[in-house]
Image (cartoon, rainbow, N blue to C red):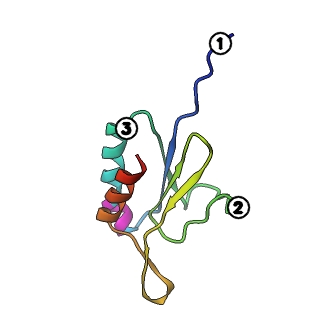
C-alpha cells in the first residue's frame, strides 16, 4: 500500500496587463514563491485565461486566492474604499501572506 502525498496548498495570483498595482505585487509573489517552495503558486492573467466565475470572481486586480489542502478558499482582494471600490497595496499583500502562511 503506497503513501498518499497530500495536494499542496495553492496560491493563485490573479492579475492583468497594465495594472500598476499588479506590477508592484508581482515581485512580492515571486519572493513568496522562492521562500515557500511547498506552496504551488499559480499566476493567472485574467485576459488570457477562461475564467470560471462560479469559483471566484475577482473584484479587483490583483487578487490572491489561497486554496488550502482541505479545499478551503481564502481570498484577498483589498480593503473596502469609498464608492464601493476596493484598494490593494503591496503592504496589505505582504501582511495577508504572512497571516496565511
Q: Callout 1: helix, strand or loop?
A: loop
Q: Is residue 72 left or right of residue 88?
A: right
| Percent position of residue 34, x then y | 33, 38
Residue 57 vertical position relative to residue 43 in the rendered view, above or below: below
Q: Secondary structure at mark 2?
A: loop
- Which of these two is toward me, 77 or 17? 77
Q: Reply yes or no: does residue 21 show up in magenta.
A: yes
Please tell me whether mark 1 or mark 3 is closer to you in this view.
1
Instruction: Determine whether label 3 and label 2 are within 8 Å by CB.
Output: no
Q: Alpha-carbon distance for marks 1 and 3?
A: 26 Å
Q: Which mark is residue 2?
A: 1
Q: For mark 2, what is the residue?
A: 54
Extreme bottom residue here?
83
Q: Counting residues from the N terminus, which is met first, the one under dot 2 or under dot 1?
A: 1
Q: What's drawn in magenta, residue-wise?
A: 20-24
Residue at left offset 33%, top offset 58%: 95
Disc on the earlier residue, 3 or 2 = 3
Quarter assignment of residue 96: bottom left
Query: Which of the two marks, 2 or 1, is nearer to us in this view?
Result: 1
Name the residue: 30% across, 52% down: 27
Image position, residue 30 (x, y; %): 34, 46
Q: Which residue is mark 3?
A: 36
Amino acid at each position: 500500500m503506497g503513501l498518499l502525498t497530500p495536494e499542496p496548498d495553492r496560491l493563485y495570483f490573479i492579475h492583468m496587463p497594465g495594472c500598476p498595482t499588479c506590477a508592484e505585487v508581482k515581485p512580492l509573489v515571486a519572493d513568496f514563491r522562492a521562500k515557500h517552495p511547498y506552496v504551488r503558486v499559480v499566476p493567472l492573467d485574467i485576459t488570457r485565461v477562461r475564467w470560471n466565475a462560479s469559483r471566484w470572481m475577482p473584484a479587483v486586480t490583483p487578487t490572491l486566492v489561497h486554496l488550502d489542502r482541505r479545499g478551503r478558499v481564502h481570498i484577498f482582494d483589498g480593503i473596502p474604499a469609498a464608492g464601493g471600490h476596493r484598494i490593494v497595496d503591496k503592504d496589505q499583500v505582504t501582511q495577508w501572506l504572512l497571516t496565511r502562511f
